[in-house]
Image (spheres, helix red, strand yellow):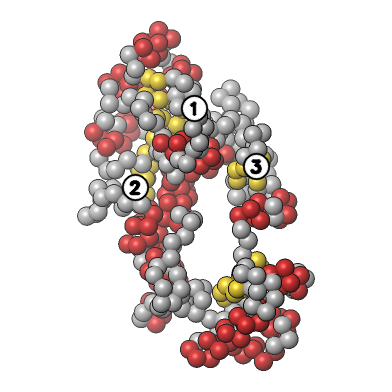
């Protein structure tokens, strides 16, 4: 571990990220970087700070959600609207490799912290702006959430079952795929460029753009057939018998992903229904008939029966697990995907493995302003100056 408490074996050890984001997309992005060894400084205001701390939290406790996405980070609470707060922040910029912010377009400029300003003082700085609609376009300044971004991108229209309203997922696709993963990729690419050229870049990420860019199968249908399928009727949304969910006798569900002919044939043979083999990709009345046949079969026995029957059959027939069941799954245990914290709570490990790097939680999610003094001291501010900033409530400590 290095002097700043980060994992020294991480590939991003020695990289400092100034994180001005809150809630989910931005903090999840910087969690990727922190878990890989970067020194992520969570820059918060001196008022409410990141209000994810209080999300569904019991009185006197910190939200599990906040703890999950802010581990391995440090917190600096500073008022950037005050000139002295801005100046102290600029001292941090001199030693930073990247900055990521999630305000609406124009907010950073109003604080005197636009990319052009910081780029002049630190040319190698990578500066990422994460927003719902991007920095340009007619909706750039509009508010939104995951549901709105998916709606605009044509994703929500394709999500759900035939004849029913669009379905909402508890996995925030635009926030996480668009906000977290896409921004992390952009930052890492720009950091490599800065290492080679000495010049940082401005990274503009729109969560709506990213949702659109990953809406692959719907665009495939539009290009191939001139139209998208009705909701719930495309290849991967329940339109064919070999790919979908089927209810069992006890009200549980099986996920059937037997897309390839070999898997479908094996499924049919295991069920003793070789006659269904030709119906793998059937649509229309024939497809409905095959789906109904399969649904009747799976409803004839409880989930445990089917899991036992398909345990040694490699046909892509698997349970629809609850999260509690997933946390106890031996596959995830073998991959060390569940982090058991000393207080009995659980978190997820990073979803990747890397040689010569062992993931660990080196620090719990920070209290608001927990590291204000040490961070400002590292930036070169004298102790007396830091104490005045605290006394004048420009900086907050916990």
Q: Residue furthest left?
A: 138
**Residue 168: image x %, image y %?**
43, 61
At horizontal 60% and vertical 73% (from top left) the residue drawn is 247
Classify mark 1: residues with Cα within 10 Å, few (<14), some (14-19) or many (20+): some
Image check: 243 left or right of 389? Answer: right
The residue that disc 3 covers is 339
Q: State the mark number for residue 191.
A: none
Task: Tell me the SS state at disc 3.
Answer: strand
Q: Is residue 97 visible?
A: no
- Residue 333 vs 112, above or below: the answer is below
- Residue 117 vs 189, above or below: the answer is above
Q: Earlier in the sequence, mark 1 or mark 3?
A: 3
Quadrant containing the N terminus is top right
Give the Cα distance between marks 1 and 3: 20 Å
**Residue 313: image x %, image y %?**
74, 73
* Cβ atoms under marks 2 and 3 closer than 8 Å: no
Image check: 318 left or right of 232? Answer: right
The residue that disc 1 covers is 367
**Residue 273: image x %, image y %?**
70, 88
Give the Cα distance between marks 2 and 3: 30 Å
At horizontal 36% and vertical 52% (from top left) the residue drawn is 145
Classify mark 3: residues with Cα within 10 Å, few (<14), some (14-19) or many (20+): some
At horizontal 37% and vertical 30% (from top left) the residue drawn is 48
Q: State the mark number for residue 131.
A: 2
Q: Quadrant of residue 275?
A: bottom right
């Amino acid at each position: 571990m290095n002097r700043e408490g980060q994992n020294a074996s991480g590939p991003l050890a020695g990289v400092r990220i100034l994180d001005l984001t809150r809630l989910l997309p931005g903090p999840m992005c910087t969690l990727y970087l922190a878990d890989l060894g970067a020194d992520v400084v969570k820059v918060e205001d001196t008022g409410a700070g990141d209000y994810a701390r209080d999300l569904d939290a019991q009185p006197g406790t910190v939200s599990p959600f906040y703890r999950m996405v802010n581990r391995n980070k440090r917190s600096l609470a500073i008022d950037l609207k005050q000139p002295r707060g801005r100046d102290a922040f600029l001292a941090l910029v001199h030693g930073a490799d990247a900055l990521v912010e999630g305000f609406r377009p124009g907010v950073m400029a109003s604080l005197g912290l636009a990319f052009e300003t910081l780029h002049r003082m630190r040319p190698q700085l990578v500066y990422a702006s994460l927003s719902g609609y991007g920095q340009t376009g007619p909706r750039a300044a509009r508010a939104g959430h995951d549901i709105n971004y998916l709606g605009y991108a044509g994703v929500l229209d394709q999500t759900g079952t035939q004849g029913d309203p669009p379905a909402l997922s508890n996995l925030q696709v635009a926030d996480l795929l668009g906000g977290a993963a896409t921004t992390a990729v952009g930052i890492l690419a720009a950091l490599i460029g800065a290492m080679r050229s000495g010049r940082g870049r401005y990274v503009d990420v729109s969560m709506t753009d990213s949702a659109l860019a990953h809406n692959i199968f719907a665009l495939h249908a539009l290009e191939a057939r001139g139209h998208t399928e009705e909701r719930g009727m495309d290849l991967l949304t329940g339109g064919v018998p070999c790919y979908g969910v089927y209810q069992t006798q006890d009200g549980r569900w099986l996920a059937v992903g037997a897309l390839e002919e070999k898997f479908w044939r094996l499924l049919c043979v295991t069920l003793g229904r070789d006659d269904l083999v030709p119906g793998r990709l059937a649509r229309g009345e024939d497809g409905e008939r095959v789906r109904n046949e399969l649904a009747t079969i799976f409803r004839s026995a409880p989930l445990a029966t089917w899991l036992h029957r398909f345990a040694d059959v490699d046909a892509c027939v698997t349970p629809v697990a609850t999260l509690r069941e997933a946390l106890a799954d031996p596959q995830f245990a073998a991959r060390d995907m569940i982090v058991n914290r000393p207080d009995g709570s659980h978190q997820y490990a990073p979803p990747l493995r890397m040689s010569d790097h062992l993931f660990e939680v080196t620090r719990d999610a920070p209290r608001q302003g927990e590291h204000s003094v040490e961070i400002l001291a590292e930036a070169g501010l004298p102790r007396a100056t830091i104490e005045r900033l605290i006394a004048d409530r420009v900086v907050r400590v916990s």
